[in-house]
Image (spheres, grey):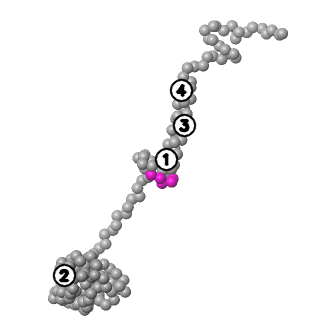
Amino acid sequence: MASYPKDRFDQLPDDLKRIGAHRGPKKGGGGWVVLAWCLLATGILVFGGLYGVSKYLGVDLGIPIFAVPATPTPTPTPTPTMDPILDPLAPEVVARQITVTVLNGTTTSGLQTTVGTSLGTVGWVVNGMAKASTDDIEETTVYYSDPLNEDAARGVVVSLGIGKIRLVPVETFPGATLTVVLGSDYPGAG
């Protein structure tokens, strides 16, 4: 067998406790470092996955940092309204030839005649009074088909003391400029 000359690596002090190919002993706690890196990598992957699900799929996870921002609701622009006609006998109002039909949408018999007469007394031209096709109307409403007659519809509501106005197509109530449909909220309706 061949023998090799001795060199400086063959004469190591005993306190190094080298084994094999000049390896030193393992340092303590090396496994904890690996575990810490694994936990850190897992946390980053889970965080990234949750972020992706919430951001790109729009899923609300109930976690504040992943909350999908609410879509702002646009604020409606207030629609300008016309002032009500308070004097239906004014010459400019009379020239518009505004007529009113009164329909009774309640179970109270003759209410359309009472209301039509009172509107005629204050100056509105009432051209018809009848029972509505149904008697279960809840809210008194003044319908108008021309946006220029909004002021007249508001004026009739003021004269009635109750009601709301609603713009409808001309075909809905073709008989008059304004149509009042009395509901169960009208005072005296039973």
| Mark 4 in CB contact with mark 3 (< 8 angstroms) | no
Q: Which residue does the numbered mark 1 point to in the structure image?
A: 51
Q: Secondary structure at mark 4?
A: helix
Q: Quick check: is 58 in the magenta stretch?
A: yes
Q: Quadrant of residue 135?
A: bottom left
In this rendering, position of residue 120 left or right of residue 137:
left
Structural crowding at the residue carrying mark 2, measured as other residues with C-alpha within 10 Å and reported as few (<14), some (14–19) or many (≥20):
many
Number of residues whose C-alpha sits closer than 10 Å to that of mark 4, classed few (under 14), some (14–19) or many (20 or more)? few
Q: Secondary structure at mark 3?
A: helix
Disc 4 marks a residue whose amino acid type is Trp
Marks 2 and 3 sit apart, C-alpha to C-alpha, by: 76 Å
Question: Residue 159: which numbered mark, if any?
Answer: 2
The range drawn in magenta is 56-60
Q: What is the distance, in whole Å, between disc 2 and disc 4 at their CAs? A: 86 Å
Q: CA distance from mark 3 to mark 1?
A: 15 Å
User: Hey, what amino acid is under mark 3?
Assistant: Ala
Q: Amino acid at mark 2?
A: Ser
Residue receiving disc 3: 41
**Which residue in the protein does label 4 denote?**
32
Image height of 38 relative to 142, above or below: above
Lower position in the chain sequence, tag 1 or tag 2: 1
Quarter of the image for the N terminus: give it: top right
Q: SS class of the residue under badge 1?
A: helix
The answer to whether one can see residue 153 in this image is no
Q: Earlier in the sequence, mark 4 or mark 3?
A: 4
